Amino acid sequence: MLPDKRGHFNGFGGKYVPETLMVALDELEREYKRARKDKRFKDKLDYYLRQYAGRPTPLYYAENLTKKLGGARIYLKREDLLLSGAHKINNTLGQVLLAKRMKKTRIIAETGAGQHGVATATAAAMFGLSCDVYMGDEDIKRQSLNVFRMKLLGAKVIPVHSGSKTLKDAINETLRDWVTNVRDTHYVLGSVVGPHPYPMIVRDFQSVIGKEAKRQLMRKEGRLPDYLVACVGGGSNSIGLFHPFFKEKKVRFIGVEAAGEGLRTDKHAAAIMGGKVGVLHGSKSFVLQNSDGQIDIAHSVSAGLDYPGVGPEHSYYSRIKRASYVGADDRQALKGFKMLSEVEGIIPALEPAHAIAYLTKLAPRLKKEKIIIVCLSGRGDKDIDIVKDALKL
Amino acid sequence: MNRIDKRFKELRRKKKKAFIVYVTAGDPNAKATERIILELDRCGVDILELGIPFSDPIADGPTIQAASQRSLSNNINIGKILGLVGRVRRATDIPIALMTYYNPVYIYGIKDFVKDAKDAGVDGIIVPDLPPEEAEELISYSRRANFKNIFLLSPTSSRERIKFITKKSSGFIYYVSLTGVTGARESLPKDIANNVKMIKRMTDKPVCVGFGVSTPKQARSIARIADGVIVGSAVIKVIEKNLKKRDIHKKVARFITSLIRPVKGI
């Protein structure tokens, strides 16, 4: 079972952090391993996931979309229906409960699209911890609704002016805060990135997506799906869906990266398709970078995918060919956004709109007996301004 | 003998403490860095930490972040920095340790990096985001080349880690004075003396203290307890104020002299 003891996924992952954080990472890993075996912790998390956040989420048969695309049967895993509007709450409830166990009084987080920030602020409000969220200037502009929601939830949103002013720089700044305040602060990392044990912890908390979907499809169809499709930025919703199916060799995984203005341009966020192995934010994985090892600025219409790295477990899946990674560009994502809204009456976030966009290629070429599960990781309210401008509505 | 070891041996014989200065290579440009290095040598700086800038310096505060950006905007890279070291080596024997993040080194290729750096006249390397656990490859190439790997300890390091890191570190041990990023501070934590004492009980290797040091008073109090004092951001601030000046190296020298006296006076 990976990661190994040192947090490696066959050479990816690891702990590339300043010494000051090593002890905090060890403490987090120890406490997490203890909590994982503690029935009371599991029951408590389960209680809040059900009663508070709204699990289980439906596995919805998208009949209209299936008919429109005229191929495989499409199921949507409705993470968009969760409290705070995305799958991020699965992880933040778990991590904030861990923070309480470690007697930390303050929570910090990074956010790109604002979904992880909102989910962290939500969990912090629920459990009475103070919460600071770092967010790039650029993202504050394009995701203003979520900034307002975080403030309403009692969190402080700290703008980040450095570098590309997006998710990458927000993570830099959160790490700097953590190095400074490590004794009383827990960093709630929002994706399957960063140093070990984060990629493992976030994966485990998000695996509820795949576990539920598996059970639900068994009940409805009496069998496993043929394809799992999810968008990949850092890659938490996709790992959450994929991981519980890892040993089911016949189930194919497709991760959809943000191709921005095109994979041939320098404006995209497809780390696996267009990057090289490197070390960013504490772990070894595929990274968009130049020939000197300086990190490139990513681009995507979706703030949540606008990140030059990707979780180490995805790099591992890619290397062993357990998953394939494809791209959907900004234009295709916007089309997917519009299509799902019109055909199913579901307004998706721009992130999963990339996965929806890829369906238009995948579903029609598959036979009608085939089954695809798509992770609809979040809802699209936060994106209405961007979409309004882009589609000239 | 490696220049860093040699320098500490001399200092121990004279019962003096090391004064170590960090500057970012290529800030404000490569020529100025060369002049600054030679001037530092003339001022009596014992060891130079030469920064290879990285786009995402998570252990650095605003001052060194800005220096990194200035340097990167000149398209500096490892190859050019090693060329710079090669040029100053003709004129100075000052021990030089490169300081950078892991990715540029990893992308350059660890084996090539150690070889090329050594050939250029570099004596060691400090990588704040590379704990010894992930450094096996670097350590093994470095050992063969007598190239020093200086690892860091912090106020949060446990006894086990102090034991482990003092064993892995060569050249000296870099004790980070505070929990936080680089940058000048008005006051430093009170636990430095006790922590340094504890580390020194567990190793014979020199222990030098950096992060936050910016005033003569701070430099003096650290020189009393440690084997060396490391100053970085405070020097970069002087560079920052004199970016356009032709005699930028003289301005740096004046500041360095004010700090070096209290360190050497002990």
Image (cartoon, grey):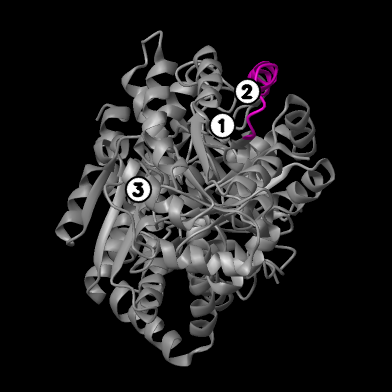
Residue depicted at 24% across the width and 30% down the height: A393
> How far is the residue under mark 2 from the one under mark 1?
9 Å
For disc 3, the chain is B
- In the image, taking residue A4 as reference, residue A281 lies left or right, namely left
Q: Name the residue under label 3.
A: B218
Disc 3 with disc 1 on a shared chain? yes
Q: How far apart are marks 3 and 1 (CA)?
A: 22 Å
Label 1 CA crowd tier, 10 Å (few <14, some 14–19, many 20+): many
Q: Which mark is residue B50?
A: 1
Identify the image quadrant of residue A263.
top right
Disc 2 marks a residue whose amino acid type is Ile
Question: What residue is rendered at 47% in x and 40% in y?
Answer: B57
The residue tagged 2 is B81
- Subunit ID for the residue under disc 1: B
Judge whether residue A75 can be spotted in this image.
Answer: no
Q: What residue type is labelled 1?
A: Leu
Earlier along the polypeptide chain: callout 2 or callout 1?
A: 1
Crowding at mark 2 (Cα within 10 Å: few <14, some 14-19, many 20+): many
Q: Residue B260 carries which label?
A: none
Which mark is in front, 2 or 1?
1
In the depicted view, which residue is nearer to us: A304 or A99?
A99
Q: Give the range drawn in magenta.
A: B81-96
Secondary structure type for disc 1 = strand
Query: Crowding at label 3, few (<14), some or many (≥20) Cα neighbours within 10 Å?
Result: some
